Image: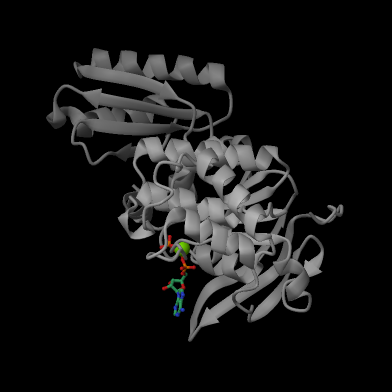
Amino acid sequence: MTAHSSAPAIETEGLVKTYGDKRAVDGIDLVIPQGMVYGVLGPNGAGKTTFVKMLATLLRPDGGRARVFGRDVVRDADEVRSRVSLTGQYASLDEDLTGAENLILLGRLLGHGRSGARVRAAQMLEAFVLTEAADRQVKTYSGGMRRRLDIAASILNTPDLLFLDEPTTGLDPRSRNHVWEIVRAIVAQGTTVLLTTQYLDEADQLAGRIAVIDSGRVIAEGTKGELKASVGAGSVHLRLRDAAQRPEAEKLLRLALDDAPVTLEPDPVALTARLTGTDGSGAAERASRALAELARAGISVDTFSLGQPSLDEVFLALTDDAPGSGRTVQEAIA
Ligand SMILES: Nc1ncnc2c1ncn2[C@@H]1O[C@H](COP(=O)(O)OP(=O)(O)OP(=O)(O)O)[C@@H](O)[C@H]1O
Ligand SMILES: [Mg+2]
């Protein structure tokens, strides 16, 4: 493995990629430190894959600059390539070969000797719980098995920087958890991981810092705590017994919570008020006062919860400026 320099893992300045008159990546400035999982979160078409492909030297930027460990992705492409690995959204395994054959072939291509490649493949298959499936053709694998094999292939030679482009899209909860464990183990070994995801909870689980991107631009960047704090003190979630009382509940909540934005959920008895301000203890007090107001007005509340802002709410708040756009985004990433 190449020695780590002190440069950030990734640094971009005004990075742009256009397709025709579409700016898929529209001026991204980011500094991504070494040694962490960095989450790039955004809905379909936000520009995540395009961004990652430029960093992995698979696409040439149309504007701006990007450096990986201090090396320019265009000028020093070979050097960058030697330190990074990419697990794509669309896996690049040979379907007709077995899992073991895929890894052995790749190991040979990466310069391992015949027995070295075999040993490494066997280690990986075991670590990724694929030993039993090792001698089956990849075309017989489930989506989760395929994804694990794809990640195994990308870390056969431990890269300094690993791009994981939506590694868990389409996986069931158990397989997602499995991939999350793998990602944590990879980072614990010192590899920096740039992970793209449409799932807010995934970024929440794994990433130390997060950039939220939409339409090719960064709309927020920071630690999870910073992103959540930027949205306020949290949210009050209510489910009413009677949907007919929702309009009045909405009005009362807004009043009792000092003009807090109230969202009507798709579920006709549910509503959410986003608390403004940053004082957590004050939030609980204000929420219980609001509940008392509802009770006084004869509105029956079925369930109630006061939560820390979730990344979902962060995303909604960030994309809220166009009416209804938050809801559309939320549906897109649900
Ligand atoms: N080869 C291409 N030719 C033309 N347009 C493209 C091409 N690749 C991507 N785009 C467009 O660029 C925009 C960003 O696409 P990109 O694949 O980077 O998004 P994404 O965030 O990875 O989305 P997803 O979550 O669906 O994977 C989209 O509008 C897409 O249609
Ligand atoms: Mg993509």
Q: How is the image coloured?
A: one colour
Is 331 left or right of 58, judged from the image as shown? Answer: left
Quarter of the rendered structure image containing ligand 1 = bottom left
Question: On screen, 295 above or below 172?
Answer: above
Question: On screen, 293 above or below 190?
Answer: above
The residue shown at (55%, 16%) is: 281
In the rendered image, residue 35, in percent from the top left (x then y), is placed at 73, 44
Is residue 206 in sight in this rendering? yes
In the rendered image, residue 121, in percent from the top left (x then y), is placed at 57, 50
* Quadrant position of the N terminus in the picture: bottom right
Is residue 40 in sight in this rendering? no
In front of the other: 202 or 127: 127
- Residue extending furthest toward the front: 115
Is 240 left or right of 97, judged from the image as shown? Answer: left
In the rendered image, residue 167, in percent from the top left (x then y), is placed at 47, 51
The residue shown at (38%, 32%) is: 273
The residue shown at (86%, 54%) is: 5
In the rendered image, residue 287, in percent from the top left (x then y), is placed at 41, 19
Q: Quadrant of residue 307?
A: top left
In front of the other: 299 or 9: 9
The residue shown at (62%, 53%) is: 156
Total marks shown come to 0
Question: On screen, 293 above or below 193?
Answer: above
Is 227 left or right of 286, judged from the image as shown? Answer: right
In front of the other: 315 or 81: 81
